[in-house]
């Protein structure tokens, strides 16, 4: 089981919008040095919606090869087309990823039965551990706990990234799923409480800029050291909030550029962080100094 602080890694880009492989390597080194427990590549934070098939697969191959089994690599392979998600998941298997993260199909609003059949087909077609991803605030599609429980019976569906921010709902799910089914937070602000309730980790935006502190907070929470975990979470909360003043990954890419870790670029239709929010994000970064 993959546990701990799993960074939802950005995709660095050059001034012309191409993938910046040199900065990618620097970012991966940064996380390996700072104690991040796993890399999630080409998820929402990695701008998966604007990478084409070839770029998506190339990023997965690059990250897997560069990390070279030092920590787990989870590949973002979800799509609103089952055929596309199948293709991306197979590419991740070929690349050697440790697991895949599959967001619920967005925009087309499938039924709960449609969600079940979508994930069941992918799991039965591609032999790689798969993590479900529910983020209704971005997809207009909410996968119920009942559907997650049905899917948890499929052998290689091994977990859920719950980005609802609803800790009570997460606790209800934790009480129902098998012990070997991992529930991860996908919401930095509530991740500590979910892990204190039995969650196995946090797939984190904040870990991009504060990997050591996020790794420590996750470790404390998973170990049940509530007072210490909550104290560190309280320190990080202004950063959690600042990194969502505009749509993710706009603020976090600006923050990483301010830290001189990547160049300041992002693909349309996303744009660079608005000037009005830049002082707030810069101030929030003080927590890591």
Image (cartoon, grey):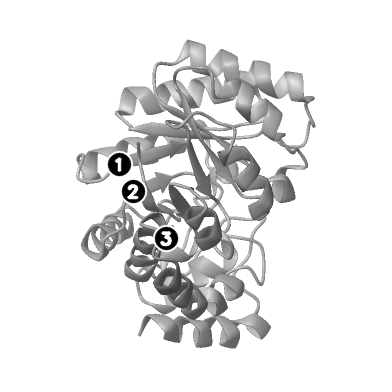
On the image, the x and y values in percent for residue 240 come to 55, 70
* In this picture, residue 90 sits left or right of residue 140: left
- Check disc 1: other Cα within 10 Å, few if <14, some if 14-19, many if 20+: many
Could you say which is closer to the camera, residue 69 or residue 165?
165
Task: Give the mark nearer the N terminus: 2 vs 3.
Answer: 2
Residue at coordinates 43% horizontally, 71% vertically from top-left? 256
Quadrant holding the N terminus: top left
Q: Which residue is mark 3?
A: 221
Q: State the image quarter where residue 277 is shown.
A: bottom right
Which residue matches tag 1? Answer: 72
Left or right: residue 271 compared with residue 227: right
Cβ–Cβ under 8 Å for marks 3 and 1: no
Distance between the alpha carbons at the discs numbered 2 and 1: 5 Å
Q: Position of residue 170 (x, y in %)?
A: 62, 46
Q: Secondary structure at mark 1?
A: loop
Name the residue rendered at 47%, 32% in the picture: 181
| Mark closest to the chain's N terminus, 2 or 1 | 2
Residue at horizontal 42%, vertical 63%?
A: 207
In the rendered structure, find residue 38 and report the number of the disc placed on it. 2
Residue 142 in picture, x, y percent from top left: 74, 38
Using the numbered discs, state the Cα–Cα distance from disc 3 to disc 1 in whole angstroms: 20 Å
Dot 2 crowding, Cα within 10 Å, few <14, some 14–19, many 20+ = many
Where is residue 62 shown, x and y percent of the image? Answer: 30, 41
């Amino acid at each position: 089981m993959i546990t701990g602080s799993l960074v939802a890694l950005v995709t660095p880009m050059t001034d012309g919008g191409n993938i910046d492989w040199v900065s990618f390597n620097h970012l991966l080194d940064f996380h390996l040095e700072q104690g991040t427990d796993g890399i999630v590549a080409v998820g929402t934070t990695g701008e998966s919606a604007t990478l084409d098939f070839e770029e998506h697969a190339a990023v997965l191959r690059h990250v897997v090869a560069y990390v070279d089994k030092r920590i787990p690599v989870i590949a973002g392979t979800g799509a609103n087309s089952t055929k596309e998600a199948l293709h991306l998941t197979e590419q991740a298997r070929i690349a050697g990823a440790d697991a895949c993260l599959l967001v619920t199909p967005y925009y087309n609003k499938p039924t709960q039965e449609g969600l079940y059949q979508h994930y069941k087909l992918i799991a039965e077609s591609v032999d790689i551990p798969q993590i479900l991803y529910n983020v209704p605030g971005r997809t207009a599609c909410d996968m119920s706990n009942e559907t997650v429980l049905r899917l948890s019976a499929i052998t290689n569906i091994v977990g859920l990234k719950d980005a609802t921010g609803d800790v009570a709902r997460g606790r209800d799910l934790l009480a129902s799923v098998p012990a070997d089914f991992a529930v991860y937070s996908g919401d930095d602000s509530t991740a500590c409480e979910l892990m204190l309730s039995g969650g196995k980790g946090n797939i984190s935006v904040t870990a991009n800029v504060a990997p050591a502190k996020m790794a420590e907070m996750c470790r404390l929470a998973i170990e049940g050291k509530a007072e210490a975990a909550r104290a560190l979470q309280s320190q990080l909360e202004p950063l959690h909030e600042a990194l969502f003043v505009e749509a993710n990954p706009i603020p976090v890419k600006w923050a990483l550029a301010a830290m001189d870790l990547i160049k300041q670029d992002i693909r349309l239709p996303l744009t660079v962080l608005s000037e009005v929010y830049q002082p707030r994000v810069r101030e929030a970064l003080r927590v890591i100094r």
